[in-house]
Image (cartoon, rainbow, N blue to C red):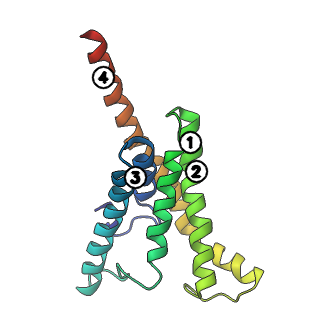
């Protein structure tokens, strides 16, 4: 639901944090992949509904969007690499997930002739990366914000459960 809030900063959405969290915490790999992608799909569906009713300027579904879904699977795999939930690991993961997504998704936009259809030159690629910077900034901020909430709550609940088990 957060993704469709009008006026939110570009790229500011919980999906990167959700994919990392799924990969790091959910033991069943099928669900670790399915939940973040299902969340993205639901928000795209809602976004598309708002677009078709004239309440939003951006469609929920568009050509080449499948790349985003694949890249969220990649972000979930980055979560699998999180061996511990220490602050340093979380901070580096919160930075790495949107960075990997930004680099790969903007390369795909440039290579596929999407977006502003930048020329197929090094300069065109750099322009395409420049086009995506507002989204990247929002994605970094969102991953830190939502990641802190998700992982913070998880650690708090997990510690309480461990304390209960030790007390018994």
Q: Give the residue displayed 28% in from the left and 16% down from the top.
A: 165
Which residue is denoted by mark 3 in the rendering? 18
- Residue in the foreground of this view, choosing between 106 and 166: 166
Circle 2 crowding by C-alpha within 10 Å: few under 14, some 14–19, many from 20: some
The label nearer to you, 3 versus 2, is 3
Q: Quadrant of residue 98?
A: bottom right
Mark whose residue sits in front, 4 or 1: 4
Q: Which mark is residue 46?
A: none
Spatial CA distance of label 4 from label 1 is: 23 Å
Q: Which residue is mark 2?
A: 95
The secondary structure type at the circle numbered 4 is helix
Q: Which mark is residue 160?
A: 4
Q: Position of residue 112 (x, y in %)?
A: 58, 85
Disc 1, SS: helix
> Nearest the camera: 27 or 146?
27
Report how far apart the C-alphas of labels 1 and 3 lie in the structure: 15 Å
- 3D distance between C-alphas at marks 3 and 2: 14 Å
| For marks 4 and 1 on the same chain, the one whose residue lies earlier in the sequence | 1
Looking at the image, tell me whether mark 3 or mark 2 is earlier in sequence order: 3
In percent of width and height, residue 152 lies at 40, 36
Q: CA distance from mark 2 to mark 1?
A: 6 Å
* Label 1 vs 3, first from the N-terminus: 3
Q: Eyeballing the image, is 158 above or below 41?
A: above
Q: Which mark is residue 91?
A: 1
Marks 4 and 3, Cα distance to the nearest angstrom?
22 Å
Query: Is 112 situated above or below 35?
Result: below
Check contact, mark 2 vs mark 1: CB within 8 A.
Answer: yes
């Amino acid at each position: 639901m957060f993704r469709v809030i009008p006026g939110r900063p570009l790229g500011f959405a919980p999906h990167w944090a959700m994919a990392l969290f799924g990969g790091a915490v959910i033991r069943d790999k099928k669900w670790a992949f399915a939940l973040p992608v299902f969340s993205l799909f639901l928000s795209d569906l809602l976004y598309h509904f708002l677009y078709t009713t004239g309440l939003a300027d951006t469609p929920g579904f568009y050509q080449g969007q499948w790349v985003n879904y694949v890249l969220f699977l990649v972000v979930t795999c980055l979560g699998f690499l999180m061996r511990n939930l220490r602050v340093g690991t979380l901070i580096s993961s919160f930075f790495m997930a949107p960075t990997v997504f930004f680099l790969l998704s903007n390369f795909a936009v440039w290579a596929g002739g999407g977006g502003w259809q930048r020329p197929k030159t090094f300069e065109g690629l750099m322009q395409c990366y420049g086009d995506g910077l507002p989204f990247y900034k929002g994605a970094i901020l969102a991953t830190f914000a939502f990641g802190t909430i998700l992982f913070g709550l998880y650690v708090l609940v997990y510690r309480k459960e461990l304390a209960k088990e030790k007390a018994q």
